[in-house]
Amino acid sequence: MASLLKKYQPESFEALSQLAKETMKDGALSAKTKELMAISLSIATNCEPCVKIHTRRALQLGSSAEEIAETIGVAWNGVAGRTNCRLSYVRLVDGVAFRNDENVRDVNEHFLIGDWNVKFQDCDFGVHYYSIYGKIFDNAVVDLNHSWIGIHGNGHWLGLLWHGVILYQNGDTKYAAQPKRHNDGWLYRLEAKWEGKDRTFQVLGMHSTGGRDGSGFQTLHQIIHTQGYWAYTHIFTCDDPSDVNEYALEPGNLGYGLNSLQAKFQCALPFNIQLTSSAAWYGSDVAMPAFTKQASKTIGSELAAILTFPLSDNLALDAGAALTFLGEAGKNMYQGYDMNQVNEIFSRFQFVF
């Protein structure tokens, strides 16, 4: 892929190469530390060429075999007929920018991944296990011990492509000078997709169980403060280039549980322009704190549309808008002030490979 980009888009290739060089050079973190981190990420994303590249660079920068072994842990993949599986261990080192702070230095977090998948004709099924334990640094050292186990299935039925997930979570979080906090719960997700000539239509329904004071189902995104592309929306979730109004709503809804129904429609327009429109509704499984005197389950709804303009074989321009209507729980837990409606206009250039 890189060779094709270099041949047909040399300016784009040079710009991306320069960006990679700037990102991986010495800064607050040394180039050596960054390469060790890149090895772990390459294993977690199952990118074998990336593992080889970053391992070679780490060795060139003076990393020892012991350092690389402690960084990458153990990863194993296997394929047998219709079955494939993955077992891996990743050691995540936090606090590397605080080498002189005894309370933060060498804070270690451990991530275990186990997947087993089997294909049968045009369907596939899988069993998954994920576990994170150890410590992270979040303004203070936090002890974590969380596990997720679940199943998924994909297949065609009634002219639609179906994707379903059932996931169970159980774990504890311990902040300094605070009692241990326990979370457990279930997530159910079902998605159907219809494909026609130059158009597609998707529907997504999801439910996760909540608990009082946020003790229900919890995602890894919530625990380590990241975001994932799991929904069709742009303001409630991260699916646009702007973070001005992004609320980072995740499937666990801060442990209060989430009910959601979403739809997305895509079609081709003249001049190879593509339209993507979406609508979504979100509600909490249990009542959340709200601006009103009584707790509320109403998070909100969102409408959005994006036009994609192809500029070349590998470059496109997205231009879109989103409109969000907030309920009492949505205003208090995600917006932070009493505003009923939020809108956003955005654009982005996007490389497509």
Image: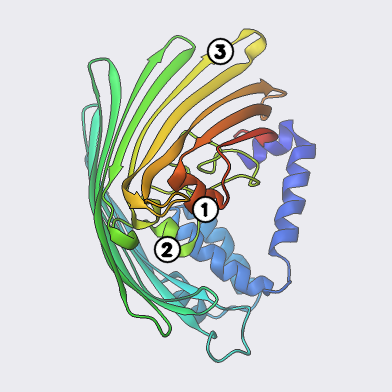
Tell whether 8 sits left or right of 219: right
**Residue receiving disc 3:** 268
- Location of residue 179 in the rendering, given as x and y in whole percent from the top left corner: 33, 80
Give the secondary structure at mark 1: helix
**Residue receiving disc 1:** 49
Q: Toward the viewer: 260 or 150?
A: 260
Assess whether mark 1 and mark 3 are in contact (beta carbons under 8 angstroms). Answer: no
- Location of residue 178 in the rendering, given as x and y in whole percent from the top left corner: 39, 81
Give the secondary structure at mark 3: strand
Number of other residues with Cα within 10 Å of mark 1, as a class: few under 14, some 14 to 19, many 20 or more: few
| Amino acid at dot 1 | Pro
Chain-order first, disc 2 or disc 1: 1
* Residue at (31, 38) in percent of width and height: 206
Residue 144 against residue 341 in the figure, above or below: below
**Quadrant of residue 182 within the rendered picture:** bottom left
**Residue receiving disc 2:** 223
